[in-house]
Amino acid sequence: MAITRIGNPAIADVRGVNFRNIIINGDMSVSQRGTSTASITASGYHSIDRFQTSASSIGTWTQSQSTDVPTGQGFAKSLKMDCTTADASPAASDNLIIIQKFEGQNLQYLKKGTSSAKQLTLSFWVKSNKTGTYIAGLHDRDNSRIVSKSYTISSADTWEKKTITFPADTTGALDNDNAGSLDIQMWLAAGSDFSGGTLATTWQSQTNANRAVGQVNLADSTSNEWYITGVQLEAGQVASDFEFLPFDINRERCLRYFYRSRNESNGTVWFGSMTNAALGCTHQFPVIMRATPTMGYGWTTAYSGNTFVDVVGGGTSTWTLTQNQVGRECVKNIYDSGKTGITVGRQYGTHMEADAEL
């Protein structure tokens, strides 16, 4: 029987790729924020681009970009979660989830909320020392609807490929805009508020107690680790081979949501000294960002200290930045007014990050 592969017709074919994978950076190859983030106790974006960690008071974690991957599958990186402080008895509201959120405007071809709605199939490689039942789910944020499926890690410390098909949902169309409409959620731990009901194996109105029923507690030991790579979510009921993208295209797709200048080959943002009390700069982002980003600046890795280095005189200074005309394409006329100590004719450098994540 021939398999019809359904891609996203809204995205043009590039280098023979039809972008059938809804997941961005499913091979975990892009990590602009760094290859490892330790002491995670709260929600946020950490090492691997586009994957958010939702954490609510359940242990302490390190997320890293690992080179531990399934043999012979073409992957070079995986996302690793390492429990560094255990929580063997989660509170009712505790949870730990790896999430990727999708813009509604990129999912209109799924025809969710109509009689022609498409099924979705999730496939991925996973490995953990903690065997047992895990939960993967979809969350429709626009209509407060959920569906969840379980999978089993059968063999400890062994890469296993999993495939899950979610049913079509004929209720609730996704908004056609650049906001977060749909999430894929990979559960790692869940308190009773999320696991005390009956697993929502068909689409239903959101009842938190039905989202992660049966989920093991990955937080119950500091020996626990969990790895994932090759994550693919596509229309239809058959899992096709993982869609490898050229690295530059994969990275450009990530840059729509987050950009850090330090990661460029010449990552310093140079400011010209207009007067002895003002600096000026126009910096164009590599791609058009999803929304007007939140900006951060700093010569160090903090991106919050507003520190500059004097390219001629050396040393660093901390100044207050005024941002004029921050847009989706560029930041224009960034300057520090009223600050003395700037030498006319010199260049001052810093690094910037722009955050337009969902």
Image (cartoon, rainbow, N blue to C red):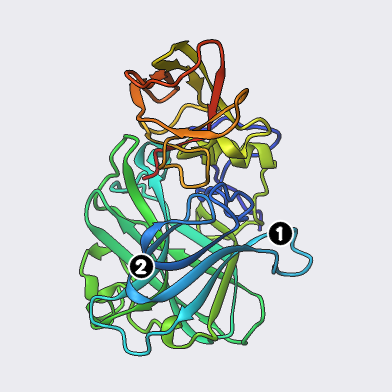
The reply to whether residue 128 is in sight is: yes
Residue at the limit of the structure toward the right, as seen here: 72
Q: Nearer the viewer, residue 20 or 52?
A: 52
Q: Position of residue 240 (x, y in %)?
A: 62, 56
Residue, disc 1: 75
Q: Which mark is residue 233?
A: none
Residue, disc 2: 55
The quarter of the picture where residue 173 lies is: top left
Q: Secondary structure at mark 1?
A: loop
Q: Secondary structure at mark 2?
A: strand
Give above or below for 11 relative to 48.
above
Q: Position of residue 202 (x, y in %)?
A: 32, 68
What's the residue at 43%, 87% (across, down)? 220
Disc 1/disc 2 C-alpha distance (Å): 27 Å
Q: Nearer the viewer, residue 30 or 326?
A: 326
Q: Position of residue 223 (x, y in %)?
A: 55, 86
Could you tell whether 356 is left or right of 247 in the image?
left
What's the residue at 62%, 87% (across, down)? 155
Q: Position of residue 206 (x, y in %)?
A: 22, 64
What's the residue at 29%, 46% (across, down)? 114
Q: Nearer the viewer, residue 183 or 321?
A: 321
The quarter of the picture where residue 139 lies is: bottom left
What's the residue at 42%, 36% (across, down)? 306
- Looking at the image, tell me whether mark 1 or mark 2 is earlier in sequence order: 2
Report crowding for label 2: few under 14, some 14 to 19, many 20 or more residues within 10 A (C-alpha): many
Tell me which amino acid carries mark 1. Answer: Phe
Report crowding for label 1: few under 14, some 14 to 19, many 20 or more residues within 10 A (C-alpha): some
The reply to whether residue 18 is in sight is: no
Work out which quarter of the rendered image holds the C terminus and state it. top left
Tell me which amino acid carries mark 2. Answer: Ala
Give above or below for 182 relative to 15.
below
